[in-house]
Every structure is written in structure tokens, then in C-alpha cells.
Image: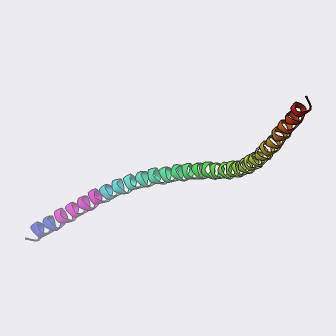
Amino acid sequence: MTQIATWFLLTAFILFVLFMVTKTFFYKHIAQKEEKTSASIKLTLHEAEILIRKHQLQLQRALGNNDILTEEMNTMKNEIKALKARNSQYKIECDKYKTRIRELEQKIEALL
């Protein structure tokens, strides 16, 4: 009986060791896969951060250009207002000159 018990214990020990070795390799393989996945995710996040920074810069430039264009548009509006005012003033002067010309033509006709 002692030989059978010894053989049983030895077999159980060997099976336990084999089980533990297999389990160790299995978890080691899973850990390596996880490290690869983690490295891939870190690389993807880094690339995403770079793209976000790039688009942030483009957005800031576009907003800056928008501000510049808004300022130019406001100056153009002011210039248009000034031109309209000048044009209306020229129309008034032109009407004055036309009435003055009519008056002078009437005086000339009256003299003839």
C-alpha cells in the first residue's frame, strides 16, 4: 500500500506540476498579448493626440483668419457708407447745378 500511495502522490504531484506549468505558460501568453494590445492602443492614442493638436492649430488659424476677414468686412462696410454719403451729396450738388443751369437758360432766353 505504501508503494501505491507513494506512486499516487508522485503522480498527483507530477500532474499538479504539469498543470501549473501549463497554466503559467497560458497566462504568460495572455500577458504578452495584452502588452501588445496595450502598446498598440498607446500608439493609436499618441497618433490621435497628434491629429487633435494639428486640427486645433488649423482651427485657431481659421478663427484668426475669420477675425481678420470680419475686420476687413467692417472696414468695407464703413467705406461703403462713406461712399453712399458722398454719392448722395454729389447728387444734391448735381441737382443744384441743374436748377442753376435752368435758371441761367431762362435768363438767357429772356434776354434774347
Residue 26 vs 108, above or below: the answer is below
Residue 8 vs 40, above or below: the answer is below
Q: Image point 32% across, 55% down: which residue?
A: 25
Q: Residue 17 sits in which quadrant?
A: bottom left
Residue sitting nearer the eye, 57 or 89: 89
Residues in magenta?
A: 10-23
Q: Is the magenta stretch mostly helix, strand or loop?
A: helix
Q: Where is residue 91 in the image (x, y as percent from the top left)?
A: 77, 42
Viewport quadrant of the C terminus: top right
Q: Position of residue 22 (x, y in %)?
A: 27, 56
Q: Image point 45% across, 53% down: which residue?
A: 41
Residue 67 vs 108, above or below: the answer is below
Q: Where is residue 11 in the image (x, y as percent from the top left)?
A: 17, 62
Q: Does the magenta stretch include residue 14?
A: yes
Q: In this view, does 97 lie to the left or right of 60?
A: right
Q: In this view, does 71 lie to the left or right of 12?
A: right
Count of picture labels:
0
Q: Is residue 103 left or right of residue 59?
A: right
Residue sitting nearer the eye, 29 or 62: 62
Looking at this view, name the residue that lies furthest to the top: 112
Q: Is residue 48 left or right of residue 64?
A: left
Looking at this view, name the residue that lies furthest to the left: 1
Q: Is residue 106 magenta?
A: no
Viewport quadrant of the N terminus: bottom left
Residue 12 vs 51, above or below: the answer is below
Q: Image point 17% across, 65% down: which residue?
A: 12
- Name the colouring of the figure: rainbow
Looking at this view, name the residue that lies furthest to the right: 111
Residue sitting nearer the eye, 74 or 79: 79
Q: Position of residue 108 (x, y in %)?
A: 90, 32
